[in-house]
Image: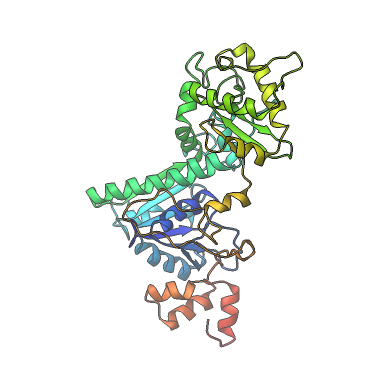
Amino acid sequence: MSLSGLNVVEFAGLAPGPFAGLILADNGANVIRVDKPSSASIDVLCRGKRSIAINPKIPSGREALRKLISTADVLIDPFRPGVMERLGLGPEVFLGDGEKKGLNEKLIYARIVGFPRTGPQKDMAGHDINYLALTGVLAMLPGEGKPAFPLNLLADFAGGGVMCAVGILLALIERGKSGRGQVVNTDMVSGARYIAAFPLLHSLVPDSQYFGNKRGSNVLDGGAPFYDVYTCKDGGWMSVGCLEPQFFSAFIRTFLPALPENFSLPDGWRPSLETQGNHDDWPKLRAFMEKGFLRNTRDYWADVFQGTDACALPVLTPKEALASEPVGSQFPMAHPKISGSQPLKAQTGDLGSFKLLDPGSHTNEILAELNYSEKERNGLALDGALGEEARTIRRSGHKL
């Protein structure tokens, strides 16, 4: 696989950090997640990773982490600014500071924060919806009265995790030229703005059909009836995205014959192929489509439009969408696919058997790889670096 042989240390976090690590692991990297001892994990993005549970606030634990990071190609730091420095694990420790040599000067030190590091919010707490609020994008999203937010996809994952992974890959290429490690700084506000370059730039173009007018009146923000989601008789939904004239034509030529012959609005109005270009008719077209889709179920309409160029497809539930994954897999497939790269083995099992990565599952294994003897591992346990449970076990005379 493309990243085979790449060693990554990912400090446990939420959403963007784990996703950046998942992208690397899915492409062959050896990813070790650093967890707090005795912690519980809610990280579902753990495919292909191992876990070491160790306390960096204990001197021997901090020294073990320095050894681990000194063997790594990449470190993923998901914490707020200054946390890693206070733990004695900041980038200068490994990359050097110009005067003092670092422990691992080829390290790619990747940092993910919410707000720009030099902005007024740099020390504030926040989440995806807050980061998105500062990008200008949230104000453009569809919604009745107020914008609706797209789960936590745009800032956490697109602007954070994906952009961090891209930065890591770019830094690895640069390291291949210079032989030097790099610091990759990703913030979710800037990352989401970059991801949203298309709508943000169109918002600056007067009368742009995409985003140049008031929210909710443009083609892609819910203003166009031929780019929207419609409710069906059974409560399911159909997505319609027939933007181009040829696709709108295919939609009308498929939709109308599937309705009763005299189906129309109360005033007798019915759409024609010319309706798309007449903005004054858009409210009538929307009412017609809403009324039409309500006449039958989602699956009925899915069958009607199957195989056409009408750009009308059913909105699948998460469970239904599993059908597109390999048999038995609950995990979305790694993407993109690269020719010549060995495919990743899917994580299998039914929905009830999905397994999280238990913190510390591989602590002894990873310490052994760092050439810690059994005596040294026991010393870490007695110091409390591996958590109170490990210290209690060792004090009782049992092996870890």
Residue 136 appears in which quarter of the rendering?
Answer: top right
Tell me where residue 373 appears, x and y as whole percent.
Answer: 40, 81
- Drawn side of residue 31 relative to residue 221, left or right: left
Task: Tell which of 205 and 397 is nearer to you.
Answer: 205
| Residue furthest out toward the bottom | 397
| Residue furthest out toward the front | 261
Tell me where residue 17 appears, x and y as whole percent.
Answer: 49, 51
Q: Is 390 placed above or below 28 here?
A: below
Residue 104 visible to an observer of this rendering: yes
Q: Is 179 placed above or below 395 here?
A: above
**Way the structure is coloured:** rainbow
- Drawn side of residue 261 relative to residue 120, left or right: right
Tell me where residue 281 appears, x and y as whole percent.
Answer: 63, 14
State the residue at coordinates (47%, 76%). 364
Give the number of callouts.
0
Task: Tell which of 171 and 96 is nearer to you.
Answer: 171
Task: Tell which of 17 and 288 is nearer to you.
Answer: 288
Task: Tell which of 314 and 193 is nearer to you.
Answer: 314
State the residue at coordinates (49%, 47%). 81
Q: Is 34 placed above or below 169 here?
A: below
- Drawn side of residue 360 relative to residue 146, left or right: left
Q: Is 89 placed above or below 384 here?
A: above
State the residue at coordinates (43%, 72%). 366
Residue 184 visible to an observer of this rendering: no
Tell me where residue 260 appears, x and y as whole percent.
Answer: 71, 26
Residue 75 appears in which quarter of the rendering?
Answer: bottom left
The N terminus: image quadrant: bottom left
